[in-house]
Image (cartoon, rainbow, N blue to C red):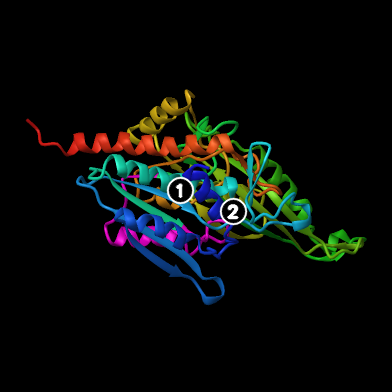
Amino acid sequence: MNTTLRLAEQLIALPSITPEDGGCTALIISHLKPLGFDCEMIDLGPETFRVRNLWAKRPGSSQKTLAFAGHVDVVPTGPLSKWSSDPFTPSHRDGQLFGRGASDMKTSLAAMVVATQEFLKECPNPALGIAFLLTSDEEGPALDGTVRICELLKQRNETPDFCIVGEPTSVKKTGDMIKNGRRGSLSGKLIVKGIQGHIAYPQLADNPVHRAAPALAELAATLWDEGNEFFPPTSWQISNVQAGTGATNVIPGEMVIDFNFRFCTESTADSLKQRLTAILNKHELTFEIAWTLSGLPFLTTPGTLVEAVRSAIHQVTGLQTELSTTGGTSDGRFIAQTCPQVIELGPPNATIHKIDEHVALEDIEPLKEIYKQVLLKLNQASFAESAPAN
């Protein structure tokens, strides 16, 4: 059994359902401290939902730092009776490692730690600084995890130059896809006001469903933007619609619509709010909206980090990786507000959050090696940048 697999199994065996870390943070610290990392454990949030965060840093001789970022928490298991084996007892079947967090994202964490160990064995005095930013609140509300640590690091002027988030981004094989950005997420709860009344006397009532229907049709047909080279066009989708009292002879007094924008860098949250409100006003609706901005879009265009990752993936696997910005949000949205270059790279994501979550054994060691090669390449670049000019 190789070192990466062994550590991945040890992490999977520690139940860490959000916001519990299950001892995962302490286990990782036990590997980082002997390497010279200054490990700062930061617990945040109310006592009823205490979040454990880790900021661990090992300076290099240059000013450049790469942060490995991720989360030790996992989603609930679902019905245990439906699992083929205990979700917190790592097991092997048919060349796969099974367990909650196998793909999302304890294998990535293990690969990051072991890659760092091997890198520092080869380069004991690197130019590149290395950091770890870990949380136990990524799968939950994400209020007292990475976002709070990023705010703290900004205040201390301690933000990294590069960041790799270990989210499971690959499709069929480790390294076939990386995320160099993510769309933003803007949600709204729209309440359209009407007048409740008897269905037999519509002249004495005002049906908000009838009033809202043309506006909703226009919103659904609106082209919010055309996207760009890296992002698809912004999407507006309704997730829930509620109206009525349950009786068949009552015109409802209000209609509640939950909706969401997944938006790219061609639009802003403010511009989307203004355009949507203008359409509702155009249709002369009486309404209220409560907005929730859960994440801004971010994009890392090809440059030092992307090219190092691309090169490392091809060197280790022979694959030409695909850059993508699809999928849901991640903690990369918080890190990108202060770190100029952020990408996400992890194992295949086909079974994340599912019953019998697993990762192929053959995908584990290449992930570690990719992380290691990225460290070597960024370290070489940092040495070159810090060398005195002739």
Q: Amino acid at mark 1?
A: Gly
Neighbor class of circle 1 (other Cα within 10 Å; few <14, some 14-19, many 20+) is many
Query: Magenta region: which residues?
Result: 135-163
Examine the structure image and report whether residue 159 is included in the region drawn in magenta. Answer: yes
Q: State whether residue 320 appears in this view.
A: no
Q: Is residue 304 above or below residue 117?
A: above
Q: Position of residue 276 (x, y in %)?
A: 58, 48
Residue name at image x 22 percent, y 45 percent: 125
Q: State whether residue 65 appears in this view.
A: yes
Q: Quadrant of residue 121?
A: top left
Residue marked by disc 1: 332
Q: 188 or 194: nearer the eye?
A: 188
Q: Position of residue 359 (x, y in %)?
A: 60, 41
SS for callout 2 = strand
Badge 1 or badge 2: first in the primary sequence: 2
Extreme residue toward the left, this view = 390
Residue marked by disc 2: 187
Q: What is the distance, in whole Å, between disc 1 and disc 2 at their CAs?
A: 19 Å
Q: Position of residue 205 (x, y in %)?
A: 82, 63
Q: 292 or 302: nearer the eye?
A: 302
**Lateral position of residue 168 relative to residue 191, left or right:** left
Neighbor class of circle 2 (other Cα within 10 Å; few <14, some 14-19, many 20+) is many
Q: Is residue 171 above or below residue 281?
A: above
Circle count: 2
**Lateral position of residue 276 relative to residue 40, left or right:** right
Q: 108 or 191: nearer the eye?
A: 108
**Lateral position of residue 183 relative to residue 39, left or right:** right
Q: Is residue 241 above or below residue 309?
A: below
SS for callout 1 = helix
Residue name at image x 74 percent, y 57 percent: 80
Between circles 1 and 2, the one closer to the viewer is: 1
Q: Amino acid at mark 2?
A: Ser
